Image (tube, helix red, strand yellow):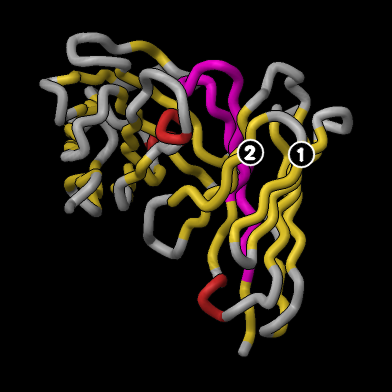
Amino acid sequence: NAGVTQTPKFQVLKTGQSMTLQCAQDMNHNSMYWYRQDPGMGLRLIYYSASEGTTDKGEVPNGYNVSRLNKREFSLRLESAAPSQTSVYFCASTFDRGRGVAKNIQYFGAGTRLSVL
Amino acid sequence: QKEVEQDPGPLSVPEGAIVSLNCTYSNSAFQYFMWYRQYSRKGPELLMYTYSSGNKEDGRFTAQVDKSSKYISLFIRDSQPSDSATYLCAMRGVNNNDMRFGAGTRLTVKP
């Protein structure tokens, strides 16, 4: 059971370059999320998708775009990378409908460490 | 001021000690309170969750929520070297997309 898989694990970009971070989950979850984690800041939500075909902005969306390709996959794109986007990026998913414990559990991938020079 | 404040530590304790980790928050709309554990170079994993005020115990871990004081705690009894990790508090209101995380406390349990 793979859970949430993120690729790549590491990436170095030059300012102005573009790239797409990939995320896939095999748990049949409806909601998926992209976070960034910076020292002293905790995890901050960039974008989320409550279902296939829908996406919404989170706390820090500027400079990013997302695509919910299908129920399994949710990608994050940096069109023109900036040094301020140097961070660790986490994708997460959850079953977000109904009641009960499952609604509170976000499952995270292992992260993508991105450096923008 | 951040919505969720968490002392980043680092915290170092001997094996077998009782560990107390804490967060304070400012948003009275938060209803669900969670603790995540994050090992180095890994993603966070849910350790405990509590709805509203009260205590919850799971093995060596106890989570406490005091909504009147806007204060949550995680206690680890008989701490083990395998508990060495960063602990993140998290909380939200009705929607999962409103989750707010603390900055994390790095804990080291020395054998």
Residue type marked 2: Thr
The front one of A37 and A50 is A50
Q: In the rendering, at what x and y percent does residue B37 appear?
A: 52, 56
Residue A92, above or below B15:
above
Q: In the rendering, at what x and y percent does residue A12 appear?
A: 25, 49
Residue B100, above or below B14:
above
Q: Quadrant of residue B86?
A: bottom right
Say if the magenta span includes residue B94: yes
In the displayed image of the protein, which residue is found farthest to the left? A70
Are discs 2 and 1 less than 8 Å apart at CB?
yes
The front one of A85 and A16 is A85
Real-space Cα separation, disc 2 to disc 1, in angstroms: 8 Å
Position of B1 with respect to B79 (left or right) is right
Identify residue for label 2.
B50
Give the residues in magenta.
Answer: B88-107
Position of B60 with respect to A89 (left or right) is right
Position of B82 with respect to B64 (left or right) is left
Q: Secondary structure at mark 2?
A: strand
Number of marks in picture: 2
The crowd level at tag 2 (other Cα within 10 Å; few <14, some 14-19, many 20+) is many
Identify residue for label 1.
B54
Mark 1 belongs to which subunit? B
Mark 2 belongs to which subunit? B
Residue for point 70% across, 70% down: B77
